[in-house]
Amino acid sequence: MDLNRVREYRDKITANCGKVILGKEDVIQHLLECWLCGGHILLEDVPGTGKTMLLRAFAASVGGSFKRIQFTPDLLPTDLTGIQYYNRKTEEFEFRPGPLFAQIILADEINRATPRTQSALLEAMEEKQITADGVTRRLKEPFMVMATQNPLESYGTFALPEAQTDRFFMRLKMGYMTRQQELEVMRRKPARTIIEELKPVVTEEETASVMEEVRKVHVADDTADYMMNIIEATRSQDHPERGVSARGTIALYAAAQARAALNGRDYVIPEDVRELAVCVLAHRMGSTVSMAESNAWIESILARIPVPTENV
């Protein structure tokens, strides 16, 4: 494995995103883990904490086509997928692609739209394709949906369908900046201006190469068993709405490989699993459960599952 290539990839993107968002290196690393595994990410927090700015900075850093969709209650599925329209010049019907045909989608305030519109994302997120008017069209890869979500108690929000929530690779929370970081942001030029100046720092070829390296990371049997012990514990409890799906199991395995590679290792250790379990698994345990509750359930499971001592 070429771990130096992976670390350089991480450092370039982290530094570029850090020009816009201060003190969120851990969130940027999670974004990278998700990106390298071909997954989608859900950022949940109160408005005004920098969610949209971070995702725009990340998209600018990795390159590729980018579209932002502002989700509202009147948004229609065809507003995402595209429509057939009649071209008077050619006297034929033509397909006008919607914003989902970009490589990186920023779905802003995704839970302000109705479940019918949210469901239009499902095929794109899972199959990397869109079917419109009976014709299936492939999306260019890598394809990633990065969605922001307001807390469910916020006015005018809808709970995401469980099938859609499960398709998000991770759920993250930004949190507030420190006092010193916020003072620095107050004094500098606007984040929007900084983002407009950002250039891609990696190529598509570099991304494809690093993705290949991530898949080579070794996971020992003891570590894989440890993951399964955590997953099975979510399915045996009485208080969650449901246990973690097989999709969640695969996501935890892949995320641990990505984290190990980004941290300069060609093997996964239990600490990788422990650091990822909450953000990969918690949102899969019920759509009406609060973020704090689901996070606490996963933390309680981690506290009682024995950690293997040999993992390589």
Image (spheres, rainbow, N blue to C red):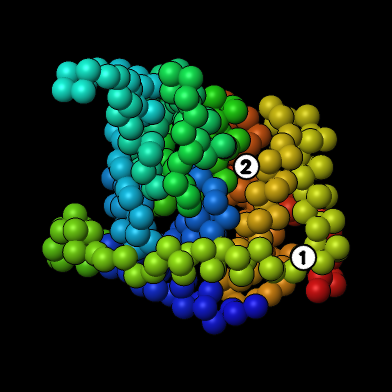
Q: Which mark is residue 154?
A: none
Looking at the image, which residue is at 27% across and 62% down? 20
Residue 291 appears anywhere in the view: no
Looking at the image, which residue is at 15% across and 59% down? 193
For the C terminus, give its image quadrant.
Answer: bottom right
- Where residue 81 sits in the image (x, y, percent)? 38, 28
In this view, the mark in front (2 or 1): 1
For the N terminus, give its image quadrant.
Answer: bottom right
80 over 146 or under it: above or below: above
- Where residue 124 sits in the image (x, y, percent)? 49, 35
Q: Earlier in the sequence, mark 2 or mark 1?
A: 1
Mark 1 Cα-neighbour bin, 10 Å: few <14, some 14–19, many ≥20 = many
Q: Secondary structure at mark 1?
A: loop
Tell which of 173 and 231 is nearer to you. 231
The residue carrying mark 2 is: 282
Q: Secondary structure at mark 2?
A: helix
Looking at the image, which residue is at 33% across and 26% down? 95
> Is there a contact, CB below 8 Å, between mark 2 and mark 1?
no
Q: Quadrant of residue 275?
A: bottom right
